[in-house]
Image: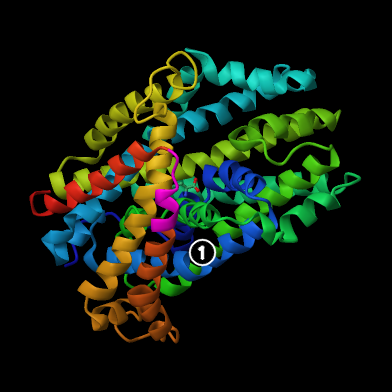
Amino acid sequence: MEQKGRESWGTRFGFIMAAAGSAIGLGNIWRFPYLTGMNGGGAFIVIYLGCVLFVGLSIMTAELAIGRRTQLAAVGAYKAYNKGWSFAGVLGVLSGFFIMGFYPVVGGWSLAYIFKSFTGLLSNTGAIGDVFGAFIGDPVQPLIWMFLYMIINVVIVARGVHAGIELAGKILMPLLFGLLIIIILKGLTLPGASAGLSFLFVPDWSVVKGSTFLAALGQAFFSLSLGMGCMITYGSYLNKEEKLPNNALIVVSMDTLAAILAGVALFPPLFAFGMEPTAGPGLVFVVAPQIFAEMGGFGVLFSVLFFLALMIAALTSSVSLLEVVVAYLMDEKKIDRKKATYGTAVVMLVLCTLSSLSLGAMSGVTVFGVGAFDFFDILTDKIFLAIGGMLLAIFAGWFLKKEDLKDELTNGGTLSFGLFEVWYNLIKYVIPVLIGIVAAVGIVSIEQTSLMIFGILVIVVLAIFSKKL
Ligand code: PFF
């Protein structure tokens, strides 16, 4: 099934940096800390780690295996085995589009905050929250930053797998870890910082609700770039010598480490300064600058470094989101890379413009009870990704031959994968049931009932028309 002339990663390090770059993003530095803050701290982290270890790692391994086996991006990979399953791939491409309907908006905010750090953002501590609110609600400013952010994305993806995506990951990922560590070292020296560490690492089980599990599971999928064919696509550029289970473990560990580091970077100073951990999506943009403002002299430097890290993390992820759609158009519609990239980016820009305006000028316009930003966010994070992951597990466990999977994961029997049976049983029996339960309990508790029904209908309609997709 190997395709002639398919692009591929140059080196193992390059692949790992690109895959970790996809996984490590706003999900780790923007979303993980605020979800942890809103869901009570340590207990959420323990549930999250359980989701990552038992569900995320297995699905990551399966996605890489299917991608490399078929040498095709999401839709093609499903189709290569069974046309009735094309819809699962198309659902992934759709998720990619929808996540890219809000992700570059937040990417643009981070880009803006790098510059705002120099221009007085930190000088008025009391008003930092108002500054953020006014900024994201402005009809023009955030659009300009989002546009600039999108241009950087397009340039990287248009350059292709090796010269673009891989190169960006190799340079930017190590820089990101370095920056986070500097910020942590600074924060931990503040008096009272230890309360933040207890909040993160001492679980309080009384705060756990049914919806906490879906929040943790959805976050695990989002953060690891799973459930939408991204790792199928990245796996399809991987050469036959690589050890897939090892690579999956490395990428998952790096992603988890980045999320924990982001938590350790934010919560100790937050507690040291007596601020609230439940600030929500504004946590990073409101609380972090306040922390930096309180640091005095070096505050500006730390603020610049922090938002640079956030922007870098976002960039290597949105590059992968764009790549999922571009790879689909190249594989299935035979459109060339540059055309596919530019065309896709234009559609994404339109979606992002709606998202950005939904936080200000167009806040009165809602679809299914929410603005465009929340529409894209809730639909993907709470419904599409988890269901996409469940479909992938069912597909791998019940529709692919066990020997084929074993062959792919052991490189034709030349390596040992001692946990193969454990992995296979998890994928075949445990994960579909587990996701089924968590999704059923969590999805019905989504406040916006009509949005929930819409999301499920989309999946059902795609499934019915699967053979035509
Ligand atoms: N994993 C990215 C993050 O944590 O920000 C977001 C993401 C990228 C989700 C790619 C899904 C995806 F396919």
Q: Is residue 28 left or right of residue 155?
A: right
Task: Name the residue: 71% across, 61% down.
Answer: 203
**Quarter of the image containing the N terminus?**
bottom left
Q: Secondary structure at mark 1?
A: helix
Q: Is residue 413 left or right of residue 256?
A: left
Reading the image, the residue beneath label 1 is 51
Up the image or down, 150 lies above or below 226; here it is: above
Q: Is residue 234 visible?
A: no
Q: Is residue 36 left or right of residue 195?
A: left
Up the image or down, 318 lies above or below 386; here it is: above
Q: Is residue 330 visible?
A: yes
Q: Residue furthest left?
A: 468
Task: Name the residue: 48% across, 57% down.
Answer: 217
Q: Is residue 321 left or right of residue 186?
A: left
Figure quadrant of residue 48: bottom right
Q: Position of residue 189 (x, y in %)?
A: 87, 47
Type of amino acid under label 1: Cys
Magenta segment: 440-447
Task: Name the residue: 27% across, 33% down.
Answer: 344
Up the image or down, 18 lies above or below 97; here it is: below
